[in-house]
Image (cartoon, rainbow, N blue to C red):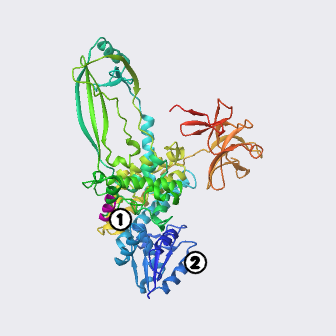
């Protein structure tokens, strides 16, 4: 019997695939890339047509030796890395590192880790697609050039440890531009008017808003003029209009929309979403099924679904919810040049494995993400929801007040899934009214408002913007955001992203010295060129040949023309006990710490304990944020170990009215920490 070797990236994936193949198949993992450009130098031979210098990644020597042994024993090698450019490149590097030129070998890909998909891929084995490899090589070399040629300039002009990146610098600029918009925004005053009417003996009054007139009401004086005209006016039902409104079923998730919805609905960062999705894709041990991949490939910008999956979903919907819920027409997604459409949308591999059936086998967050993906996909194969809407116009002299109500008459896809931002609120019913009826006015309520500046970016809205602008690809959104947060160019507070002084300095240098690198259109065009390399219509080195001269010239000019920028460390009230100076906040690999500004004469450092403005309920000292050895956050007294107070939830200065104990924050509520008391206070929004 011939022996076969299958090489994948991760041990989890290897374990899942081993289940589906016979005893003559050996499945091993490369643990990601085995070759890369060297860290210590640019690694690109500029003099010889930008030839990359690949070396074995440090620590991968023993693994490669083991893989070579396995390859020698096998009659044929299958390279089964992920089905994208990165995966194709890893297969190519493995092919070269394992010297497979004289050994029968093939490339296999599958969009989902199921028995059918894996066995089918072996039947459809092919050669390595060098267009895909070259597209990845071009991206890697462009990113290396930007990073290794511009980063030293940032060290020289601002401070050591900074970095620039082809996509990360554009993302930083987008956030900085939004910050400028917010800072320069001038709010404008406007007024609204609402009328409350008796509603045929119902407890809730009928509320209607003054309809949009030709101009916005800009001042209280203008509002008072309108109120004077409405004094003693008759309010008559002018028009009642009934109509049907259809809400289409959502499209299944792409990488971008999954990251956005997981942020809104589950409060997950893009990084956390991708880590959990990777686990669900590679395989989870499910009771009664063994180790199986629960979702399809997680890096995709397509909403396409295979015919087989479509049939399975519609069969499940018919059986579980009824024939009337099954979608009749195809739910078409957007199309355009920016969509590669290489893979299916993200969906469950087995639609019959409902969230409830796998709940016991998954961690809490794995379950919540799987439930989101399952519900969205199932909903995408269902009928639209249908609402009956009734709009009401009320006339008073030359003014019209409007209101509307809507009632759900057919749930459709909403039987399964309601997007976070689309929760419906039904208005007050007014079915007993008819045109010409006189209404009894209870009250006219005027309210002052001001226009709001654009919202700060969140991770979700930044991903959406990057996708709309064609910057980056599904695999790059999460690493890009992770990098700008790790470099402290941006900080995250209550989901919002704020630019730091350091981020502003880096962005200003990039805009001044490298305008094309941080130009949105230039970066989007470069992504399109990489797509052309993948299609085989553009030679990969042509992209690099055209890019390098301008970058090289800009770097040379920046070294001589740019002035040094000083970014001062944040000074604290903590006094250095060795020399008496005020200590400053520094950043290390594990986050913030306090250091003496007298370095190198004084090398004193100590942990940075962030105060939360709450007094310790035991000894009255400050409560600070601490972390366990595994990185989990908790709140403890600054005098630990003398004072042993700690809590997992953020404590409050508010004392419990019932028992006098301390209270902790849980969402929008304060809850007494004493479980036997259980007193709850709802906070104002």
Q: Measure how far apart labels 1 and 2 are at the Cα level.
A: 36 Å
Q: Is residue 636 left or right of residue 300?
A: right
Q: Quadrant of the N terminus?
A: bottom left
- Across and down, in percent, residue 313 comes to 34, 59
Q: Residues within 10 Å of mark 2 (few under 14, many from 20)?
A: few
Residue lying furthest bottom: 1
Does dot 1 land on a helix, a strand or a loop? helix
Instruction: Please identify the dominant SS of the magenta region.
Output: helix
Of pointers 1 and 2, the one earlier in the residue sequence: 2
The x, y position of residue 121, in whole percent, is: 37, 74
Q: Which quadrant would residue 320 be assigned to in this image? A: bottom left
Please check the rendered image and state whether residue 165 is part of the magenta-colored stretch, yes or no: no
Name which residue lies at 46% across and 63% down.
Answer: 144
The answer to whether residue 33 is left or right of residue 678 is left
Describe the element under mark 2 as helix, strand or loop: helix
387 horizontally vs 78: left or right? left
Establish if 607 lies above or below 229: below
Q: Nearer the viewer, residue 384 or 127?
A: 384
User: Could you tell me residue 524's position as x and y percent?
Assistant: 35, 55
Q: Which residues are magenta?
A: 307-314
Q: Which residue is mark 2?
A: 62
Q: Is residue 14 visible?
A: yes
Q: Write down the quadrant of residue 129 in the picture.
A: bottom left
Say if 442 sits above or below 127 in the image: above
Q: Which residue is mark 1?
A: 543
Q: Is residue 202 left or right of residue 630?
A: left
Residue with the most extreme top position: 232
Q: Determine whether 25 is above or below 559 in the image.
A: below
């Amino acid at each position: 019997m011939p022996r076969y070797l299958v090489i994948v990236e991760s041990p989890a994936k290897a374990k899942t695939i081993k289940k589906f193949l016979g005893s003559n198949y050996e499945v091993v993992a490369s643990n990601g890339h085995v070759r890369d450009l060297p860290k210590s130098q640019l690694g690109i031979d500029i003099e010889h047509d930008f030839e990359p210098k690949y070396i074995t990644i440090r620590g991968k020597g023993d693994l490669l030796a083991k893989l070579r042994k396995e390859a020698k024993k096998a009659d044929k090698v299958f390279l089964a890395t992920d089905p994208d450019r990165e995966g194709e490149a890893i297969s190519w590097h493995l092919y070269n590192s394992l010297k497979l030129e004289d050994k029968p070998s093939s490339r296999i890909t599958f969009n989902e880790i199921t028995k059918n998909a894996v066995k089918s891929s072996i039947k459809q084995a092919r050669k390595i697609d060098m267009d895909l490899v070259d597209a990845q090589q071009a991206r890697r070399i462009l990113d290396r050039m930007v990073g290794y040629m511009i980063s030293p300039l940032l060290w020289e002009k601002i401070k050591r440890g900074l970095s620039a990146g082809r996509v990360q610098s554009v993302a930083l600029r987008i956030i900085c531009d939004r910050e400028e918009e917010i800072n320069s925004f001038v709010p404008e005053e406007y007024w609204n008017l609402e009328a409350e009417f008796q509603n045929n003996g119902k407890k809730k009054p009928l509320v209607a808003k003054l309809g949009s007139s030709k101009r916005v009401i800009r001042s209280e004086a203008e509002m008072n003029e309108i109120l004077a005209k409405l004094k003693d006016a008759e309010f008559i039902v002018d028009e009642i209009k009934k109509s049907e409104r259809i809400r289409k079923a959502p499209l299944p998730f792409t990488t971008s929309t999954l990251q956005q919805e997981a942020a809104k609905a589950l409060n997950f960062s893009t990084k956390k979403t991708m880590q959990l999705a990777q686990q669900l894709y590679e395989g989870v041990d499910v009771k009664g099924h063994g180790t199986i991949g629960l979702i399809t490939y997680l890096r995709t910008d397509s909403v396409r679904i295979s015919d087989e999956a479509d049939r399975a979903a519609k069969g499940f919907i018919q059986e579980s919810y009824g024939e009337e819920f099954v979608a009749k027409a195809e739910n078409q997604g957007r199309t355009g040049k920016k969509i590669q459409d290489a893979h299916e949308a993200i969906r469950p591999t087995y639609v019959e494995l409902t969230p409830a059936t796998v709940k016991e086998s998954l961690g809490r967050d794995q379950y919540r993400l799987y439930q989101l993906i399952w519900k969205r996909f199932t909903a995408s194969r269902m009928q639209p929801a249908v609402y009956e809407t009734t709009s009401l116009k009320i006339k008073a002299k030359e003014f019209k007040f409007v209101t509307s109500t809507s009632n759900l008459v057919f749930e459709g896809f909403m039987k399964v899934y309601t997007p976070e931002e689309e929760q419906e609120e039904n208005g007050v019913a007014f079915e007993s009214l008819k045109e010409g009826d006189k209404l009894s006015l209870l009250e006219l309520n005027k309210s002052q408002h001001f226009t709001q500046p654009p919202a700060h970016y969140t991770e979700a809205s930044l991903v959406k913007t990057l996708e709309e602008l064609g910057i980056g690809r599904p695999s790059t959104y999460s690493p890009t955001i992770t990098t700008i947060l790790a470099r402290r160019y941006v900080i995250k507070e209550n989901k919002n992203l704020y630019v730091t002084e350091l981020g502003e300095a880096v962005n200003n240098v990039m805009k001044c010295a490298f305008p094309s690198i941080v130009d949105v259109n230039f970066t989007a065009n470069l992504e399109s060129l990489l797509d052309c390399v993948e299609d085989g219509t553009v030679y990969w080195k042509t992209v690099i040949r055209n890019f390098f001269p301008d970058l090289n010239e800009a770097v040379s000019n920046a070294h001589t023309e740019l002035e040094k920028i000083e970014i001062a460390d944040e000074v604290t009230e903590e006094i250095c006990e060795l020399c008496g100076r005020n200590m400053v906040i520094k950043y290390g690999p594990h986050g913030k710490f306090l250091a003496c500004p007298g370095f190198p004469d004084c090398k004193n450092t100590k942990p940075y304990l962030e105060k939360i403005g709450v007094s310790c309920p035991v000894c009255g000292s400050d409560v600070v944020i601490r972390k366990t050895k595994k990185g989990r956050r908790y709140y403890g007294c600054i005098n630990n170990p003398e004072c042993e107070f700690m809590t997992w939830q953020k404590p409050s200065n508010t004392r419990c009215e019932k028992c006098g104990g301390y209270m902790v924050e849980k969402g929008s509520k304060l809850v007494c920490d004493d479980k036997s008391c259980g007193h709850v206070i709802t906070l104002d929004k």
